[in-house]
Amino acid sequence: MEKMLRPQATVLPDSAQLPDRNVLNPPPNQFTHEIAAEQPYYYMGIDQAAAPEGAFAPGTKVTLLRQDDAGCWVADGRGLYVATACSGLRLL
């Protein structure tokens, strides 16, 4: 048998772990909207001065759970519960 090459192990930063408050378990299985274009999301609410925690890909299906003055709180199929701009949501 030939040698097996393994990638070098790396330790992810603490920021790679999702905060418990931003995870819904079980995740939603019915969706109300989809993301129209790549759109940033935030764990604590929309803050234009801060870097976003990530971005939704276009076509991602989400469930709108809450809407307030700061934006929309949505959950995706993985259970990620975050704030994003309402203008980037398209009704299914």
Image (cartoon, helix red, strand yellow):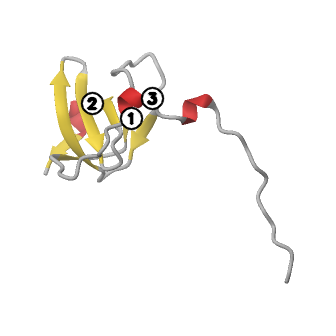
Location of residue 27 with respect to 16 vertically, above or below? below
Q: Position of residue 24 (x, y in %)?
A: 31, 38
Q: CA distance from mark 3 to mark 1?
A: 17 Å
Q: Left of 20 or right of it: where is 64? A: left
- Say left or right for 18 vs 40: right
- Pointers 1 and 2 in contact (C-beta within 8 Å): yes
Q: Find disc 1 in the rendering and name its residue.
A: 40
- Secondary structure beneath label 1: strand
The alpha-carbon separation of the residues under discs 1 and 2 comes to 8 Å
Residue at image x 22%, y 29%? 72
The kind of residue tagged 2 is Ala
User: Of callouts 3 and 2, which one flags the residue occurring earlier in the amino acid sequence?
Assistant: 3
Q: Residues within 10 Å of mark 1 (few under 14, many from 20)?
A: some
Where does the N terminus fall, quadrant-wise?
Answer: bottom right
Query: Which residue is located at x 86 percent, y 80 percent?
Result: 2
| Residue 6 rendering spot, x and y as whole percentages | 78, 62
Residue 26: % across, % down: 29, 45
Quarter of the figure with residue 12: top right
Q: Is residue 42 visible?
A: no
Mark 3 highlights which residue?
19
Q: Nearer the viewer, residue 39 or 7?
A: 7
Mark 3: amino acid: Pro
Residue 87 visible in this rendered orientation of the protein: yes
What is the three-letter code of the residue carrying label 1? Pro
User: In this orientation, which residue lies closer to the viewer: 47 or 19?
Assistant: 19
Residue drawn 21% across and 34% down?
Answer: 87
Q: Residue 85, labelled with which disc? A: 2
Q: Earlier in the sequence, mark 1 or mark 2?
A: 1
User: Marks 3 and 2, how far apart in space?
Assistant: 20 Å
